[in-house]
């Protein structure tokens, strides 16, 4: 019953986001075809507007917009005359997903490792070192770190390619730039949670009974400490995917983020709305799946709502 309620909540959330996206686009002043008014006849402008359903009343546009979302046909792009929004998402998403997933793996592996090391060496040199690294990671935004990585690893030392996309070497620098801040956040989450768990009475009891440190840490410590980190994976995933917007522009990666940024400057409303809803669906679905996964990680958690 709880899963069913969460599913309907997910659908409602997506509808609200889609509606807000539509309303915001309609409230923005100006017309995407205003720049063509001086070079094209009025009849041609009207035909172009009709092609994008902009000649219809706003309620009708809204219904057609929702229909396009349900049928997964997001319509043509204004800027790319020969491509639809579906084509742009289909061509750009693999690069964005690869970059985002690679960054998630880096952030989780090294973030968890850093947090565990810090917690197991609480108030010692390794703890202080790990937290200094985490603070630096949180303090430096990806759009500042990215040019620094390019300057040293690509331009000065020539170890890795500067930009573009195609080989695994091209993914290293943008993945590191994108993963650094989430890595630091995961490390702080894991350290705090691990310290709390290792101070619990059942841990002290197991230690007193002679349980080895390895079993104590891996069987009881990490398993219970990782749950708060799991709650962060959903927002982490989407923040990394959406964070690719700037990174893709800096590294000239042909992902959705780059198309999204270009569509804003070009007032390509169909692409803006389509990509916004697309990423929103990814966020809502990911949070739904993570919510369900809690039960798999910790059997003590029951998938029931307060009223059940």
Image (cartoon, grey):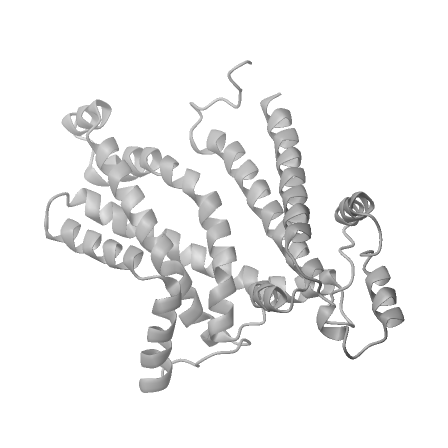
**Splitting the image into 4 quarters, where does residue 35 fall?**
bottom right
Query: Residue at (37%, 78%) from the top-left corner?
Result: 150
Residue 79, horizontal then vertical, whole percent: 71, 70
Query: Residue at (34%, 80%) from the top-left corner?
Result: 151
Given residues 173 and 43, the one toward you in this image is 43
Whether residue 112 appears in this view of the structure is: no
Left/right placement of residue 47 relative to residue 35 reads: right
Query: Residue at (26%, 54%) from the top-left corner?
Result: 134
Looking at the image, residue 89 lies above or below residue 65: below
Residue 212, horizontal then vertical, whole percent: 20, 36
Looking at the image, residue 241 lies above or below residue 150: above
- Which image quarter holds the N terminus? top right
Given residues 290 and 139, the one toward you in this image is 139
Residue 248, horizontal then vertical, whole percent: 51, 69
**Splitting the image into 4 quarters, where does residue 73 fall?**
bottom right
Left/right placement of residue 251 relative to residue 88 reads: left
Residue most extreme to the top: 307
Residue most extreme to the left: 124
Residue 233, horizontal then vertical, whole percent: 44, 45
């Amino acid at each position: 019953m709880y899963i069913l309620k969460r599913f309907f909540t997910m659908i409602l959330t997506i509808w609200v986001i889609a509606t807000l996206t539509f309303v915001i686009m309609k409230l923005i002043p100006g017309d995407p075809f205003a720049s063509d008014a001086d070079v094209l006849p009025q009849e041609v402008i009207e035909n172009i507007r009709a092609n994008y359903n902009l000649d219809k009343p706003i309620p009708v546009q809204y219904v057609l917009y929702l229909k396009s979302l349900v049928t997964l046909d997001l319509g043509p792009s204004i800027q790319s005359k020969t491509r639809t929004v579906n084509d742009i998402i289909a061509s750009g998403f693999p690069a964005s997903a690869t970059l985002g997933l690679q960054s998630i793996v880096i952030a989780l592996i090294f973030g968890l490792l850093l947090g565990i090391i810090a917690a197991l060496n609480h108030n010692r040199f390794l703890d202080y070192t790990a937290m200094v690294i985490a603070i630096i990671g949180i303090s430096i935004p990806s759009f500042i770190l990215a040019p620094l990585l390019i300057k040293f690893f690509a331009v000065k030392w020539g170890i890795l390619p500067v930009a573009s996309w195609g080989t695994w070497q091209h993914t290293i620098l943008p993945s590191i730039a994108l993963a650094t801040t989430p890595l630091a956040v995961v490390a702080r989450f894991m350290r705090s949670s691990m310290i709390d768990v290792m101070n619990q009475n059942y841990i002290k009891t197991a230690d007193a009974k002679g349980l080895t440190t390895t079993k104590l840490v891996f069987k009881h410590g990490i398993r219970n400490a990782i749950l708060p980190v799991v709650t962060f994976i959903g927002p982490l995933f989407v923040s990394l995917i959406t964070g690719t917007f700037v990174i893709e522009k800096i590294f000239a990666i042909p992902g959705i983020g780059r198309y999204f940024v270009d569509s804003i400057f070009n007032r390509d409303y169909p692409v803006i709305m389509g990509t916004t809803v697309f990423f929103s669906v990814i966020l809502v679905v990911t949070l739904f799946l993570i919510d369900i996964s809690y039960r798999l990680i910790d059997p003590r958690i029951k998938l029931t709502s307060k009223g059940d």
